[in-house]
Image (cartoon, rainbow, N blue to C red):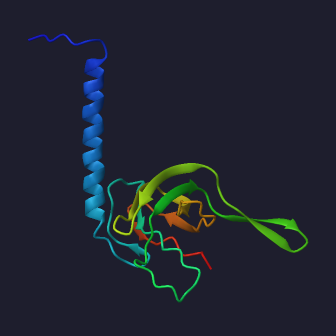
């Protein structure tokens, strides 16, 4: 049976199906990784021979210790940058932090929704953003190894 669709409809349906299947796969991988817990690297292997998994949270921003926090984790956006933090001499005895600029991935995190990044093996910098006009952008360096899971939290740098 031959069906006639307006031009582009079949491609749109095919694209919707592919996007839906991809979303289900990502959701399934996220749910299976949600139970991860460890300090540094675990022996659990995410799918893919050249990829590793990074999971964790954005620590809440608290500059004044006596203020109790509702959660140790924050709402925000996390950006993955390819490369590593470097220190550049900018004068006599003064150094400035240089952060990579190539964006690999981004995600939104909440106290109940950790970050999950499947990344090719290599060095990366995770940079947090609390939003709402915050001028604090905590960063942490991480090395991804094939088949390993790294659990880390982006630290509170609001001191």
- The reply to whether residue 52 is in sight is no
Residue found at the far left of this picture: 1
How many labels, in total? 0
Establish if 38 lies above or below 141.
below
43 vs 19, nearest the viewer = 19
Task: Out of 5 and 131, give the one closest to the viewer.
Answer: 131
Residue extending furthest toward the bottom: 66
Residue 104, horizontal then vertical, whole percent:
52, 50
- Residue 3 position, x and y percent, is 15, 12
Q: Specify whether 93 is left or right of 43.
A: right
Classify 74 as above or below 123.
Answer: below
Q: In the image, what residue occupies the spot 38% across and 54% down?
A: 49
Q: Quadrant of residue 57?
A: bottom left
Residue at image point 38% right, 61% down: 147
Q: Residue at x 28, y 35 (%)?
A: 18
Q: Determine the image quadrant of residue 62.
A: bottom right
Q: Is residue 93 above or below residue 81?
A: below
Q: Quadrant of the C terminus?
A: bottom right
From the viewer's perspective, tell me whether residue 98 is left or right of residue 83.
right
User: Which residue reaches farthest right?
Assistant: 92
User: Which residue is at the front of the view, 133 or 92?
Assistant: 133
Residue 83 place in picture, x, y as percent:
61, 57
Any part of residue 39 in sight: yes
Q: Quadrant of the N terminus?
A: top left
Taking the spot 57% from the left edge, 54% from the top edge, the residue there is 82
Tell me residue 118's x, y (percent).
40, 55
Closer-to-camera residue (83/28):
28
């Amino acid at each position: 049976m031959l069906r006639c669709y307006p031009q582009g409809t079949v491609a749109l349906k095919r694209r919707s199906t592919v996007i839906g299947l991809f979303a289900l796969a990502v959701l399934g991988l996220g749910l299976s990784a949600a139970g991860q817990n460890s300090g540094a690297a675990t022996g659990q292997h995410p799918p893919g021979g050249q990829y590793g998994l990074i999971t964790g949270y954005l620590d809440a921003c608290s500059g004044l210790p006596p203020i109790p926090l509702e959660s140790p984790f924050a709402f925000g956006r996390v950006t993955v940058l390819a490369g590593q933090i470097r220190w550049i001499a900018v004068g006599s005895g003064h150094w400035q932090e240089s952060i990579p600029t190539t964006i690999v991935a981004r995600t939104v995190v909440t106290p109940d929704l950790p970050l999950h990044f499947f990344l090719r093996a290599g060095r990366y910098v995770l940079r947090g953003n609390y939003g709402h006009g915050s001028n604090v952008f905590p960063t942490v360096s991480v090395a991804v190894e094939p088949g390993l899971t790294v659990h880390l939290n982006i630290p509170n740098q609001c001191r």
